[in-house]
Amino acid sequence: MMEKNFIPVNCTSPVVDGMVTYKSPSNIALIKYWGKKENQVPANPSISFTLDSCATTTSLKYTKLDVPSEDFSFELFFGGKPKPDFKPKIQTFLTRVAPYLPFLKSYHFVIETSNSFPHSSGIASSASGMSALALCLMHIEKQLNPDMEVAFFNTKASFLARLGSGSASRSIKGPLMQWGQHQNTEGSSDFYAIEYPYKVHQVFEGFQDTILLVDKGQKQVSSTVGHNLMHNHPFAERRFEQAHDNLTELQKVLADGDLTNFVKIVESEALTLHAMMMSSLPYFMLMKPNTLQIINKIWEFRATSKLHICFTLDAGANVHVLYPASEKELILQFIKDELVAYCENQQYICDQIGDGAVAF
Ligand code: DP6
């Protein structure tokens, strides 16, 4: 589908006032999105596990205005309190999605949002937050166009979420979502994420993600700034090619359930992401000493236990520890005994792969 397919032709039903609530999860990328072109077009394809517990719940109250407003009319609450510092991000989002949702200026919106994970845990909430809001807006469009099919609803929700935050495009459904054009993936697109369309081995069912909160502080460098540093990066082109190749390799691994190669691809992607940050100009480093301690402990434990534990990283110091459900007992015990000590206030979150957003 092309961008123009998301511009509604006629919005007929007279929707006045209402309210909608969506809970949308976070996701963790296995092949990383790092680098983008204009209009939130990714420089390379990415694939992620949708999470289950880490989620944002957003309620959107909409009231029809007598006369459409000049600018977007909205109030924003986070955890029950007004949140003026989030407003510019929402304003930018609404500006980007307005061509695809022509009704936006005809309503006043009250957006109430809260996260299941602790505030300032260092877990990015843009994926869950933007996807939840995109779904709420799609609910209004669906009322205006009641014949809209579920597949289109989800695809457009992903398309809109992407305009808010690239990784948010991958939070609409689950358990595996792919975003970005890839020649070996039929139906893949730079404009929205799709449910991974090929066979996935049962070893990945209920895959675990224990998130170790190494540093709960504000990010030193926003993702947007980080992505932009891939322009003129000396290794950018090779990195983008590598992501395509890694995705092709990962497809085999997902089909065969080959956990040894899964570990190699996933850890290499995480370290490459951070290597890109360290080799950009200006350069920066988001890993902390405890991130490295944890990585080394995981490597030692994997070598001795022969279990299929591995790590991945987002744009931050926290470590996502990934492992199959069948090895949960032993690995969780290892995490508690050996890794939790490296977390800020011993905090960690047990999550697993999930099926995507839900309406309330
Ligand atoms: C490292 O989606 O946060 O988590 O599109 O600028 O909002 P924007 O970036 P964002 O970038 C996430 C990057 C990443 C890798 C990934 O999730 O693929």
Image: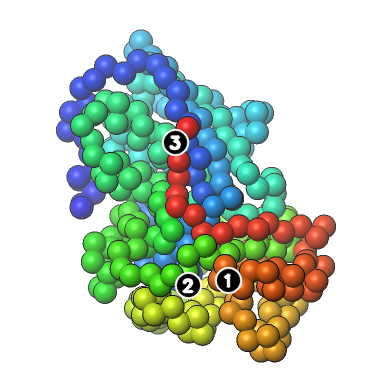
- Percent position of residue 190, x then y: 31, 60
Circles 1 and 2: CB atoms closer than 8 Å: yes
Residue with the mark numbered 3: 359
Percent of width and height locating residue 141: 30, 31
Q: Nearer the viewer, residue 90 or 199?
A: 199
Disc 1 C-beta below 8 A from ligand 1: no
Judging by the rendered image, the residue that carries numbered circle 1 is 326
- Secondary structure beneath label 3: strand
Please indicate, yes or no, whether residue 251 appears anywhere in the rendered image: yes
Q: Quadrant of residue 134?
A: top left
Q: Quadrant of residue 271?
A: bottom right
* Residue appearing at x 70%, y 89% in the figure: 304
Residue type, label 1? Ser
Residue 248 lies left or right of residue 329; in this view the side is left
Per the model, the C-alpha gap separating discs 2 and 3 is 29 Å
Crowd class of label 2 (few under 14; some 14 to 19; many from 20; radius 10 Å): some
Residue topped by disc 2: 203
Question: In the rendered view, does 213 fall on the left or right side of 360?
Answer: right
Q: Position of residue 183 (x, y in %)?
A: 25, 73
Q: How dense is the environment of label 3, judged by Cα within 10 Å: few (below 14), some, or many (20 and up)?
A: some
> Which label's residue is closer to the chain start, 1 or 2?
2
Amino acid type of disc 3?
Answer: Ala
* Amino acid type, mark 2: Val
Relative to 76, residue 135 above or below: below
